[in-house]
Amino acid sequence: MEDFQIIDNCLMVKLPVEVDHHRASYICERADKYLLEENVEHVVFDFEDTRFMDSSGIGIIMGRYKKIACFGGKVYAIHADRQIQRILTISGLTKIVEVLA
Amino acid sequence: MKNEMELTFDAISNNESFARMAVAAFVSTLNPTLEELADIKTAVSEAVTNAIIHGYENICGYGKYGEVRPCFWPVNQGKVQLNCLLCEGVLHIEVKDEGKGIEDIAQAMEPLYTTKPQLNRSGMGFAFMEAFMDELEVESAPGKGTTVRMKKKIGTGAWIGSEE
Ligand SMILES: Nc1ncnc2c1ncn2[C@@H]1O[C@H](COP(=O)(O)OP(=O)(O)OP(=O)(O)O)[C@@H](O)[C@H]1O
Ligand SMILES: [Mg+2]
């Protein structure tokens, strides 16, 4: 299950085992609710549990980036395995997302 | 060695994971590496998701309790066909829909091009299919539907041949 947490000015989004279109709409919906209602500056996507991701994951990250970038917010990706890192690289997202070990 | 399978399923988002797992299980006789499996699953997921959300414009699926999610969208009828062939260590995949089709295929295949930016689509689907598979071919006609054909050589093809 995806999970949301606010730590200081960061929204931590723990992504599910499989990030596809079916799961993406729930995640975007809930993330946007937090962005709207809470005082959040940055978003951290935690891939610890994630074993699969397709372009729907890119859409989730890009969409949230667009919402916070204009206020100086940053997007981070943590615990991304090799395959997820490959996907982030091929899509060019590594230019806007800071990938941390 | 030759092995074929055909699947037809409803164009709803719940079937995206079913489709990629079916192909992963089907190809497992060729002993693919984890990376090859991940590539194949991503490519299948892209093609099947496109058929569902663009071909049939089914944005939604069914939630945990069988409810339609997101609730304000109707569920359109339509089937996605997924055919696979294993031959000489090469996996052939065909994903077919009879949905609305693509007007300009070359433009659709450009990275970052999407007709549904409001739905959090990034326009990277075809780029991923291209990157993760060896060959990609798209056939489409407006009003008729779309067929995506992909091929990927599975690394261990050689020992399968020598075993027989
Ligand atoms: N099966 C299909 N039927 C109709 N149109 C399609 C189909 N597949 C793709 N398209 C069109 O091609 C465009 C590009 O597809 P692509 O998968 O690259 O991006 P996307 O689906 O829009 O976004 P993403 O895959 O990154 O979530 C789509 O926006 C859509 O207009
Ligand atoms: Mg797509």
Image (cartoon, coloured by chain):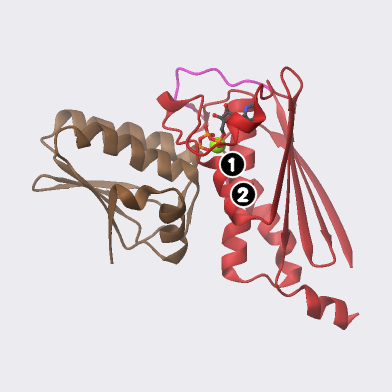
Chain colours: A brown, B red
Vertical side of A53 occupied by B126: above or below = above
Q: Quadrant of residue B75?
A: top right
Residue annotated with mark 1: B126
Q: Are marks 2 and 1 on the same chain?
A: yes
Vertical side of B72 occupied by A19: above or below = below
Residue B12 lies, in percent from the top left, at: 60, 32
Q: Nearer the viewer, residue A76 or A2?
A: A76
Vertical side of A34 occupied by A58: above or below = below
The quarter of the picture where the N terminus of chain B appears is bottom right
Residue B143 lies, in percent from the top left, at: 73, 17
The numbered dot on residue A50 is none
Q: Residue at x 14, y 38 (%)?
A: A72
The quarter of the picture where the C terminus of chain B appears is bottom right
Q: CA distance from mark 2 to mark 1?
A: 6 Å
User: Is A86 on the left or on the right of A11, as rendered?
Assistant: right
Vertical side of B47 occupied by B163: above or below = below
Image marks 2 and 1: residues in contact by CB distance under 8 Å: yes
Q: Residue at x 69, y 61 (%)?
A: B25
Q: Residue at x 42, y 34 (%)?
A: A25
Q: Quadrant of ligand 2?
A: top right
Q: Main secondary structure of the magenta part?
A: loop
Residue B49 lies, in percent from the top left, at: 59, 37
Q: Quadrant of residue B26?
A: bottom right
Residue B150 lies, in percent from the top left, at: 72, 49
Mark 1 CB in 8 Å range of ligand 1? Answer: yes
Determine if residue B52 is in view: no
Q: Please tell me how crowded label 2 is: few (under 14), some (14-19), or many (20+) other residues with Cα within 10 Å.
A: some
Tell me the magenta residue range.
Answer: B69-77
Residue annotated with mark 2: B130
- The residue tagged with tag 1: helix, strand or loop? helix
